[in-house]
Image: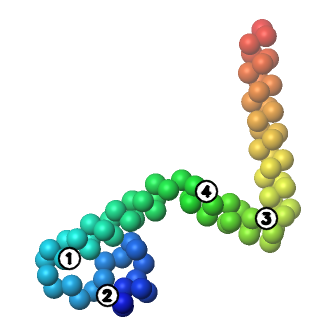
């Protein structure tokens, strides 16, 4: 199966005629797809890479978003503290 080197782990190769082999290949692909989705560190790494790329191209937008989140968090904390103090 040297031709399988170019096929992603989550894909089922074409040309499998044996039903048992086909079922095994489908199960292997399904398990690999589940592993890809559940692998949290890998997903965080992908998201971090996307954010870094976006931040490099549009730093003003990222700074505005960070400031906006900080202001919103501050307002929520202030509102909770104020309602608890009354």
- Residue 27 position within the rendered picture, expressed as x and y whole percent measured from the top left: 27, 66
Question: Which residue does the numbered mark 1 point to in the structure image?
Answer: 22
In the image: residue 20, left or right of residue 11: left
Classed neighbour count for the residue bearing mark 1: other residues with Cα under 10 Å, few (<14), some (14–19), many (≥20): some
Looking at the image, which residue is at 14% across and 74% down? 20
Quarter holding residue 1: bottom left
- Could you say whether the residue bearing mark 1 is in a helix, strand or loop? helix
Distance from label 1 to label 4 (Cα)? 33 Å
Q: Residues within 10 Å of mark 2 (few under 14, many from 20)?
A: few
> Where does residue 50 sit, x and y in percent of width and height?
67, 66
Q: CA distance from mark 1 to mark 2?
A: 14 Å
Rendered location of residue 69, percent (x, y): 77, 44
Alpha carbon separation for disc pair 3 and 4: 16 Å
Mark before the other along the chain sequence, 1 or 2: 2
Which residue is denoted by mark 2 in the rendering? 1
Label 1 with label 3: CB-CB less than 8 Å = no
């Amino acid at each position: 199966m040297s031709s399988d080197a170019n096929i992603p782990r989550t894909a089922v190769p074409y040309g499998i005629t044996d039903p048992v082999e086909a079922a095994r290949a489908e199960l292997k692909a399904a398990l690999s797809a589940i592993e890809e989705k559940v692998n949290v560190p890998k997903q965080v790494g992908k998201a971090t890479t996307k954010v870094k790329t976006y931040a490099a191209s549009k730093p003003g937008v990222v700074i505005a978003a960070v400031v906006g989140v900080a202001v919103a968090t501050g307002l929520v904390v202030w509102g909770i503290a104020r309602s608890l103090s009354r």
